[in-house]
Amino acid sequence: MESLWTTFGFRALWTPELMGGIVVIALLYAWLLHIEKSRNKTEKPTRVRHKIYFGLGLIALYGGWGSPFYLTGHMIMSIHMLQMVLAYFVAVPLLLLGMPTWVLHQVSNYSKRLKIQPLIRFIGNPILALLLFNGLFSFYHVPFMFDSLMQAPVLHSLYQYGLFGAAILMWWHMLAPLPNAYQLPDLRRIGYIFANGILITPACALIIFAPETMYATYTDPLIWANVMSYCLPAGMEVPLTMFNGPSSFTFLDARMDQQLAGVLMKIMQEIVYGITIGYVFKQWLRKERQQEGKMTISDVPST
């Protein structure tokens, strides 16, 4: 661990450009909250817990796309999988839960004025979102695709943005922050969450039960050095001794690390989806109680 801090500088470890982008997003969020206070009415004022959700979502996004995890994820596959969990299974739902409701309504109304509702209806289809995210996630972990993307930083970034957008569509139907054309009933939302858990299982199983290591990024020193060169500032040499030398940062052999990565993804995904099911069930109970509270004596038919 000490060799990591002594070998690499601030730019390689902390990804300051992403840090700056997240600070800008945080300031924009604070500006939206300031506008909310100046409005005469807001449909649902942003509560403190939603602000906390958004802040934690930004931290999770930084952990998934930046921070020391970005560098170590190129050395240890289990760390890379932790990045995936933080970016697509933690950051996305927290950011959606933290967004002010009136902003989402404004965006929805603006899309209606632009008359792009048919396009939004097509993109917002829950089946499409289900297949798109899980398909992109599974395809990403095909060995040839994974190694190719890791050696092409521009394509890798574009793929990450596409996966992030697909994650937003998928989580939109699970969390249902606004009524929409494909509003799923609560029971179907729970089934939708289960379906997501099932579709992601083959990719995790492939990683866990593969008889040998599949990813050259973590086993071939030449490919590893090429991948690492994109993480470092220009002119900095890749320390090959960190691949399999005395200062190596890895603590497991490549196959065990690969198995741990698959197990970590599956367990964390199950935990997050389990919490989401609890969230949906709580919403369901709240709706039932509200409906019961609206009933009066006049609602009871006379005998």
Image (cartoon, grey):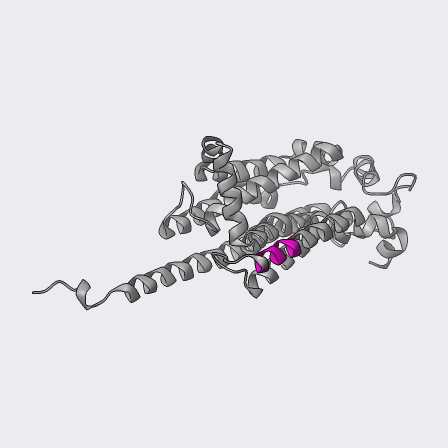
Check the image and report above or below for 282 versus 65.
below
Q: What residue span does the magenta drawing correspond to?
A: 29-37
Give the residue drawn at x 75%, y 35%. 153
Q: Is residue 205 visible?
A: no
Residue 27's x, y, as percent? Answer: 70, 54
Residue 102: x and y, percent? 52, 52
Instruction: Please provide percent x and percent y for residue 121.
Output: 45, 35
In the image: residue 291, left or right of residue 84: left
Residue 34 visible, this orientation: yes
Q: Is the residue 122 above or below the residue 174 in the image?
A: above
Query: Given the current orientation, which residue lies at the most extreme bottom position?
Result: 297
Residue 33 is inside the magenta segment: yes
**Is 23 inside the magenta-drawn segment?**
no
**Residue 206 is drawn in which quadrant?**
top right
Residue 201 position, x and y percent, is: 52, 44
Q: Residue furthest left?
A: 303
Residue sitting nearer the eye, 136 or 102: 102
Whether 23 is drawn above or below 295: the answer is above
Query: Which quarter shows the N terminus?
Result: bottom right
Q: Image point 54% across, 60% down: which residue?
A: 46
Tell me the chief SS of the magenta region: helix
Between 18 and 74, the one nearer to me in the picture: 18
